[in-house]
Image: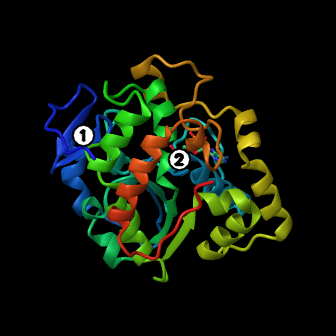
Amino acid sequence: MSQPSNRPPREFTHLYKGVRFPWMAPRSSLEALPTFQVRQDDIWLLTYSKAGTTWTDDIVNKILLYSGIRTDDDPDIDSAPYVEFSIGPQSNQELLSAAPSPRVITSHVLPEFLPTQIYQNKPKIIYIARNPKDIITSYLYHFKVIPIDEDYTSIRSIMDHFTSGNIIYGEWPCHVIHWWKKRHEENVLFLKYEDMKKDLKSAVAKIVQFLGINLDSKTITLIAEQTTIEATKQRKIKPKDYLLKKFNLSTDTSPFVRKGMVGDWKNHFSVVESEEFDKWYKEAMGDIDLTFQFE
Ligand code: A3P
């Protein structure tokens, strides 16, 4: 498997403490992140990129709307801002500091970059994990729409960067294993994308229960129906404005809603790529008792 290269940062990515980040997560935000004030009633949605973040954000937002905890359903309001992003005149950390509770906060960063208070104040943490072959496949299409790095154009190149850790947000095994080990902690809900696909109503019910919210079974079913991939596609979630402007995207093209299936990697990986990946995966995961459904 390829070694981490020392390529110079591309136009849209940069290195911070040895990890590659996209331009939306600038050094200033990453430097401020460890001291960001975490509230006990925050809901943190933590994922590796392409693991189903937008989907879960949508589910959590609907739970808060249907339970009356939130009242806004304005698509222009960011319902779960990325804590590491700074896009406008104010950083998301500044915007979030002024936001009312309960805040829903998203992040892709590796555990060591998170605010230290996340481990002390114990907000609710929802972690979504997805099989890495589908993450790589999803990345292929994501980077077609948002070309942040000239190297991310084939399964081979993305896979090589993914396995070397020289990809935006860094090493996937460190991310997923950290939260898997914390899955029994009271304030952590660890879900797998594949299980959500298999039984979305149960996944919604688990999130509702974890958040300590009272919602009847009919509403839980409704939320599950409204957040299937088919329903999500029909609603045409448009990309955020900063992405539209920066990459001149069409509002119909969302890199966050595509096929939404388990096992699409089989349509993209060659046999050789798949075998190479499996070898790396076995070594990288060691004897950890975390398994994924790959098809
Ligand atoms: P695919 O590219 O494999 O289709 P993220 O939001 O973390 O970037 O993840 C994006 C992935 O989640 C994409 O995967 C996207 O299609 C999938 N996704 C988005 N909404 C979904 C939904 N309602 N159900 C299932 N998958 C969904």
Image quarter of residue 6: top left
Of the residues tagged 2 and 1, which is closer to the observer? 2
Q: Which percent across, then down, holds residue 104?
A: 50, 58
Residue on which the image places disc 1:
26
Residue 205, given in percent of the width and then of the height, sits at 71, 70
The percent coordinates of residue 31 (x first, y second) are: 18, 52
- Label 2: how many residues lie within 10 Å, few (<14), some (14-19) or many (20+)? many
Residue situated in front as seen by the camera: 294 or 243 = 294
Res 50 visible: no
Residue at image coords 35%, 34%: 157
Q: Is mark 2 within 8 Å of ligand 1?
A: yes
Front residue (pair 134, 68): 134
Q: Give left or right: position of 207 versus 126.
A: right
Residue drawn at the location 31% of the way across and 33% of the way down:
89
243 up-or-down from 188: above or below:
above
First along the sequence among labels 2 and 1 = 1
**Image-based side of 270 in relation to 209, left or right:** left
- Name the kind of residue labelled 2 in the image: Asp
Q: Which residue is mark 2?
A: 134
For label 1, the SS is loop
